Image (cartoon, rainbow, N blue to C red):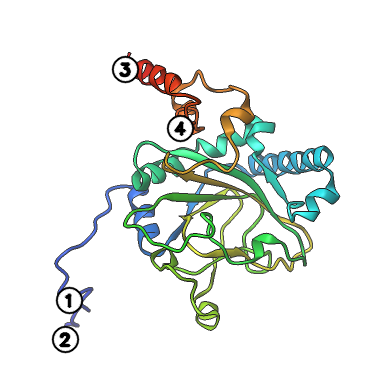
Amino acid sequence: MSRMKPAHDYGVLERAGVSDDAAAHSERIRVAGFTVVDGGFTSDEVAEFGQRLDATLAQQRDEFGYERMAAIGDEWTVRCPLVHDAIFLRLVTHSRVLAICRHLLGEYVVLMQQNGVINPPRQTHTQTAYHRDLPYQHFTSSRPLALSAIFCIDPFRKETGATTVLPATHHVERFPDETVAATLAVSVEADPGSFIVFDSMLFHRAGENQAERPRRAVNQVFSIPLIAQQISLPLALEGRYREDPALARLLGYEAMPAPSALAWRERRVARRS
């Protein structure tokens, strides 16, 4: 006796299709708000990212002072690591991540920010509160305005304080009722060397790290050029990489506001030549 195959849908007249890897990940982001992407790095490469991030954090604490960083809740954050160490440019230019960004944001993508995000063991910090990576905004848009790509240096597991997301909340304006949010929360597990890529309007937070060591990561936020960078990368880089057209655009050199009408017109002339 033959068994009837279950119907996959009923009354569906329109359906999305995916043609490649970037399209498949993009569709997950459109619907649920997040996806996990294998970065293809070796364990030695991931370990080097970790060592360089630790060194950059120590450098920034020395420059600004640990106590002063702690006073503003920034002692576990590494700001603009690519300015201090070119190795972090590899995360910004990762081909699989950029393919997803261009699939969802269009061809003109700008790096809005890059921050090392470190979740210390058994401590609360700013990232353990629910937030959007475009904070203080309560609206929805028909298309994404920005995408976040968290590069995992250490294992992202519930016990290590993996990122917790509220799926599909990039489609809603208000933060859900806390009781409802608790039932929706998903701890996103990811291996070292992978990226958690999500719509930057998705509500998320760092989980509580119950392990013995910090859980380290580097977050990139890519946006359309209408959104200002958190820190001006062209100024922080002091002109580095501006001779590379693709990198210059990605790092925001073309999106910087012109200082005058004359400069704006000169820029337009240069683009036409």
Query: What residue would you read off at disc 4?
Result: 255
Q: Amino acid at mark 4?
A: Ala
Instruction: Identify which residue, 7 or 207, lies in the foreground.
Output: 207
N-terminal of the pair, mark 2 or mark 4, is 2
Relative to 96, say whether 236 is above or below.
above
State the quadrant of the C terminus.
top left
Left or right, residue 13 beside residue 156:
left
Q: What SS does tag 4 mark?
A: loop
Going by the numbered disc 1, the residue's amino acid type is Tyr
Q: Quadrant of residue 79?
A: top right
Mark 4 vs mark 1, foreground winner is 4
Depth order, front residue of 222/71? 71
Which residue is labeled 3 in the image?
272
Q: Which mark is residue 10?
A: 1
Precedes in sequence: disc 1 or disc 2:
2
State the separation of the CA atoms marked 4 and 1: 46 Å
The earlier-in-sequence mark between 1 and 3 is 1
Disc 2 to disc 3: CB gap under 8 Å? no
Question: Which residue is tagged 2?
Answer: 1
Left or right, 79 with respect to 120, comes to: left
Marks 1/2: CA–CA distance: 25 Å
* Spot occupied by residue 106 in the image (x, y as percentages of width and height): 34, 41
Q: Could you classify mark 1 by the number of other residues whose Cα lies within 10 Å: few (under 14), some (14-19), or many (20 or more)?
A: few
At 31% from the left and 47% from the top, the residue drawn is: 20
Depth-wise, is mark 1 or mark 3 nearer the camera? 3
Q: Residue 89, image x and y in percent?
A: 58, 34
